[in-house]
Image (cartoon, rainbow, N blue to C red):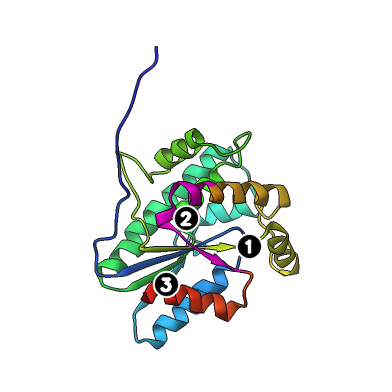
Amino acid sequence: MTYHVEFDLDFKRNTSKGLYLAVEGIDGSGKTTQVAKLQEYFLKQGKEVVRTREPRKDKESLIGELIQKILYGKTTIPPVAFQYLFSADREMHHEDVILPALKEGKIVVSDRCFWSAIPYGIMDREGSVDTNTGNWLMVAQSILSMYHQFTVPDFTFYLDVPLETAMKRLQKSDGQKEIYEDKEKLKKTIMGYQWLLQEFPKEFTVIDALKPVEEVTEEIIAKINK
């Protein structure tokens, strides 16, 4: 027996007085650098800024600690369970950090947000990203869901860089490598982001991240101020 389920949903929008910004992109796209630059800019403007990231790394997040161990290959769990860990950490992150800050009128600048659940959630899927796969992940990861939804950033900036550029940047990095910092995995991640950009063009601002760092920052700030 099969069951037909059909419903129409919109994204959950930010209705608080604060501003929610997210920077997305593959590993090596320059997200962390731009988040730091945005924090610096708004602080100079006299704004209250909360700089954060997903998944969290801090010791206060037990789930975030486990995620970091998996990302760096120190332990393993089934891929689907791993994706649900991201969602669980994201829910706690929203309730503990993001939503309270927005209600207080602060600017939240996040290195990744829930959008990452799609390009990274397809890692255990065969073939290319199609509408069915994307929609399943949107519902399963509480993005478009009747049960629970995460708040959409007011601005999401996608830092667009070629695969080879990202790989060169990652090779120059002295930090410990994550399991996703692999050429084939990054290639699939790009496919996931391309699907998102095609399906939800109004939710993203695409930035050419091949430009010098300062030019990228200026372009992002210009979009926000506009």
Residue depicted at x 33% and y 47%: 149
Q: Could you tell me how far apart the alpha carbons at marks 2 and 1 are, in whole angstroms? A: 33 Å
Q: Quadrant of the C terminus?
A: bottom left
Residue depicted at x 38% and y 55%: 92
Give the answer, above or below, for where 217 lies relative to 185: below
Query: Are there few (<14), some (14-19), or many (20+) residues within 10 Å of tag 1?
Result: many
Residue 161: assigned label:
1
Query: What range is drawn magenta here?
Result: 195-209
Q: Quadrant of the N terminus?
A: top left
Q: Could you tell me how far apart the alpha carbons at marks 3 and 2 are, in whole angstroms? A: 36 Å
Query: Are there few (<14), some (14-19), or many (20+) residues within 10 Å of tag 2?
Result: few
Query: Are there few (<14), some (14-19), or many (20+) residues within 10 Å of tag 3?
Result: few
State the image coordinates of residue 35 (x, y, percent, origin top left): 50, 72
Who comes first in sequence, dot 2 or dot 1? 2
Who comes first in sequence, dot 3 or dot 2? 2
Q: Residue furthest top?
A: 1
Viewer-nearest residue: 75 or 94: 94
Amino acid type indicated by mark 3? Lys
State the image coordinates of residue 86 (x, y, percent, origin top left): 48, 49
